[in-house]
Image (cartoon, rainbow, N blue to C red):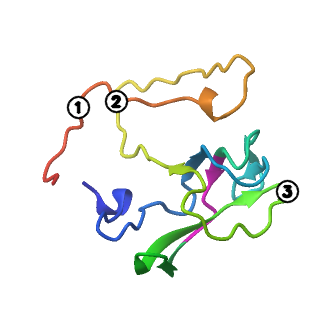
Amino acid sequence: MDINQVGIATTGISGIQTGYYFIVDNSNVGNSVNSLDQSSNVVGVGSTYLDNIYQAVAVSIAQTAVPGIGITYVTQVTVSVQDYNGLSGIGYSSYFGNYSWGRISNLTRENPNSFEIYNNGVSGISTSPVVRRLNKLKYSNYN
């Protein structure tokens, strides 16, 4: 297990880093936005609230007060969008949506393959490619 990839469970600090991609889905605030990468190229075209695929353009650790919990540290991720589309200060809520990221690294194959992605002209997170593990994770010193 690489703690830099998965984060630290006891603190809730994510291992996401600048340049990594993540998704927001089931969001309930804002209007759709087009997300950009670090070079201002479009990453994703949003269609519902803030649901989209984003690239982290900056990542930092922030200290914050969480009602009912107290002072804690969180990972603060900054993204770039084409237009705010009417989005302004969000405020505090117990739920804004789901955030998920994963990273495939250290892949080495004798005969690498490439695959074409076909989405039938339909856009949205639900039509994005999905990577699934067929075999159980092989690990050493994994707790």
Mark 3: which secondary structure?
loop
Marks 1 and 3, how far apart in space? 42 Å
Image coordinates for residue 102, horizontal then vertical, percent: 44, 47
Give amino acid for label 3: Asp
Residue in front for this viewpoint, 55 or 33: 33
At x 69% / y 33%, what residue is drawn? 124
Residue identified by numbered label 1: 136
Q: Residues within 10 Å of mark 2 (few under 14, many from 20)?
A: few
The secondary structure that dominates the magenta segment is: strand
Residue lying furthest left in this view?
141
Residue identified by numbered label 3: 83
Mark 1: which secondary structure?
loop
Asked if residue 46 is positioned above or below residue 12 in the image, the reply reads above
The answer to whether the residue labelled 2 contacts the one labelled 1, judged by CB atoms less than 8 Å apart, is yes
Image coordinates for residue 111, horizontal then vertical, percent: 38, 24
Image coordinates for residue 86, horizontal then vertical, percent: 86, 59
Residue lying furthest front in this view?
68
